[in-house]
Structure formats: C-alpha cells, structure tokens
Image (cartoon, rainbow, N blue to C red):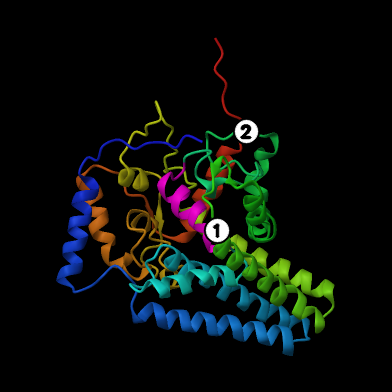
Amino acid sequence: MTLAKFPQKTGFYKTLKLRVDEYFAQKNLHYHGNWQIFLKSGIIFTGYITCYISLVFFTHNIWAALLIGFLLSQFYVMIGFNIQHDANHNSYSNHSWLNKLGSLSLDFVGGSSELWKQAHNFLHHTYTNIDNIDADMETLSLLRLNPHQEWKPWHRFQHLYFVFVYAILLFYWIYLSDFQKLITGKIGDYKLPNLGYKRLTILFSFKAFYIFYALILPSFFHPISHVIIANLLILGMVGFNLSIIFNLAHIMNKNEFPITKNQYLQDEWAIHQVKTTANFATNNWFLTWYLGGLNFQIEHHIFPRMSHIHYPIIHRIVEETCQEFNIDYINYKTIGEAVIEHINYLQYLGNPPLTVTN
C-alpha cells in the first residue's frame, strides 16, 4: 500500500516541544513514568489476580460471580489503559526491560504487543483518522466511523447497535483478528514486517497461556457453558470500555478526517494529530487515574513517548500553543457530553451520503 506523506513542518511542533522540554527541565522531570506508575501497576495487577483466583476457585454464587467478574473486567481495562499502553509506547520507564515487561501485560490478557505496535503505534498514531490506513477504525463494515468509508444500509441504525459491536471487538481481536493478521501477513493493506521466530514464539505462547487460564483451567471447577459465558461477558465489558474511550477521542463531529492530495496530507504531523483528536473530562481526577490519562488524548498523540502521568501538567502548555497557532483544541468538559456527541455523530454517519445530481 502507498502511505500518505506529511508536508514540511510549520514550526508548531518545534515550538511546543521546546516549551514542554523547558518546563520539564525547570521541574527536574523526565518523560517516562516514575514511582506513581509502578505503585499503580502493583495495585492493578494485584486486583486482577485476586479477582481471578476468587472467581475461579472460590465463587459458586451467581451474584457473587457477577460482582467479581465485573471487578475483574475493570482491572483488565486498567491494565490496557495504564500499563500496556504506556509500555508499548516505551513511556512506562526509562529502562527498556521494564517497558518490555510492561508491554507483555497485553499478551498476558490475550492480546499481542507485537501486532499492537504495528496497528496502533505506527498506523493509528501516524495516520490518525485516515481511511484505509488507520487500523483503529476498522470494524468489518459493521460501523461507519469515517465519512469517507463506504455506506451500508445497516449503518442507519449504528447509533442503536454500536454498543454490541464495541463489546464484541475485543473477543474478535483476541481469538480471530490477531491470527488473521499473522496468516495474511497484513493489517488491512499494510504488509507486516517479519516478526521472527523468537517474537512469534512469545506471541503464540501467551495466546496459549491466556486460553488456558481463561477457559481451560476454570472448566475444571465450573460447567464449561458457565466459563464461556463468563469469558464473553468479561471481554464484552472490557471491549466496550476500550472502544468507547478510544473513539471518544477521534470519532466526533469536531474531529477532522483528512484525505490525501497527490499522496500528501494538508497539515504537518503534529497539527494533524491535534485536528483529528479530542480531549474530554480533563478536570476529572478519577477518570484521569482510571483511564491512564487517555482523556488527554491530544497530549498523548503529540507526545506518545511521554508517560500518561504527565499529561495533566502539560495540558495548558499544549492548549495555549494551539491557540497561538490558530489550531482548534477540542476539549469536551465532561465524559457525558463527549458520549452524547459521539452517539450523535454515529447517527450522522449512519445517514446515506448525499449524491450530487446535474
């Protein structure tokens, strides 16, 4: 496939990075995580493992199982938002081995850090909101998330059924999509680099380990039908949380969905990231903690190798620099406002495109 190209830089990113670097130097800070993220990781993993042990070995009451299963799903979500996300961007720690260890937390819960880095770090973070390149926008045509995507009749109702699609995406990703990518050697039309024997061995070993502890081991203590239902419900809750949060940042009415002209995009990379991304609920400390700072998506997209613990402190610098360069800085005050806007935009995208007649 032919990838889009960015025009020459205008000075926005250079100015912004200089200001952020100066602030970090004044405060004696560095981009990577610190003791806060390590403590947070300990709490999250302890919660995940405790809930798993309780659910598999000690829970036989349906109501207790539902409660513990819900808690397990939330710790799973936090592994995704807080640990693997930073680690796979190499922002978790200034020690490469800790970033590698943290990145494997995604493999631990059924995903693939190697495929994530290709689909998310490269395709999504470079070519955000560009149809047929941004892998995070692919839903097998079940949803229309981009005005340049082909419209299907069922999209009329996508604002009603999107919850179900978001819920099944993680199940599809873990059990089907990752294997499809490996078999075809592609993510969409993008050809994957050769992962090599060692990385493929790690990938398949973790896939087998996840299937063992998520499905096989629990079936020794519970009916297999209950185990499958529990796995579906947990992955459904996690999948919905992951999908809605990522899409609140990009599938909104105020976001841009650029197209290329002679292979070139209109804006330099950093400006492109701001125009295709939105923040929400940046004053909500609990959401910031729970989401791993992913309510500050603009900051994350401009500084992907910065740990999420720093996003709130550079928020004003980024916003003021955007204003100085006349770049719209999209920030929804609450998550409720963002969700309503997202649903409304899904409904808008579900309408058939207007056709021009002579």
Where 152 sits versus 24, above or below? above
Q: Nearer the viewer, residue 228 or 194?
A: 194
How far from the left and from the top, in percent, is residue 292?
43, 68
Where 105 sits versus 151, above or below? below
Where 174 sits versus 33, above or below? above
Checking the image for residue 300, the label placed there is none
Give the residues in magenta: 112-129
Give the residue type at disc 2.
Trp
Task: Tell me the chief SS of the magenta region.
Answer: helix
Residue 91 shown left or right of residue 251 in the figure:
left
- Please give the residue where the numbered disc 1 appears in the rendered image: 196
Q: Magenta stretch containing residue 16, yes or no?
A: no
How far from the left and from the top, in percent, is residue 269?
33, 44
- At label 2, counting other C-alpha atoms closer than 10 Å, the crowd grade (few under 14, some 14-19, many 20 or more) is some
Determine the residue located farthest toward the front in the rendered image: 197
Checking the image for residue 151, the label placed there is 2
The residue lying at 57 percent from left, 35 percent from top is 149
Figure quadrant of residue 32: bottom left
Residue 297 shown left or right of residue 132 in the figure:
left
Q: Which of 207 and 338 is in front in this view?
A: 207
Determine the residue located farthest toward the bottom in the rendered image: 58
The residue lying at 62 percent from left, 70 percent from top is 206
Figure quadrant of residue 272: top left
* Label 2 SS: loop
Give the residue type at disc 1.
Gly
- At label 1, counting other C-alpha atoms closer than 10 Å, the crowd grade (few under 14, some 14-19, many 20 or more) is few
Q: Nearer the viewer, residue 116 or 195?
A: 195
Determine the residue located farthest toward the top in the rendered image: 358
Q: Distance between the residues labelled 1 and 2?
A: 38 Å
* Closer mark to the observer between disc 1 and disc 2: 1
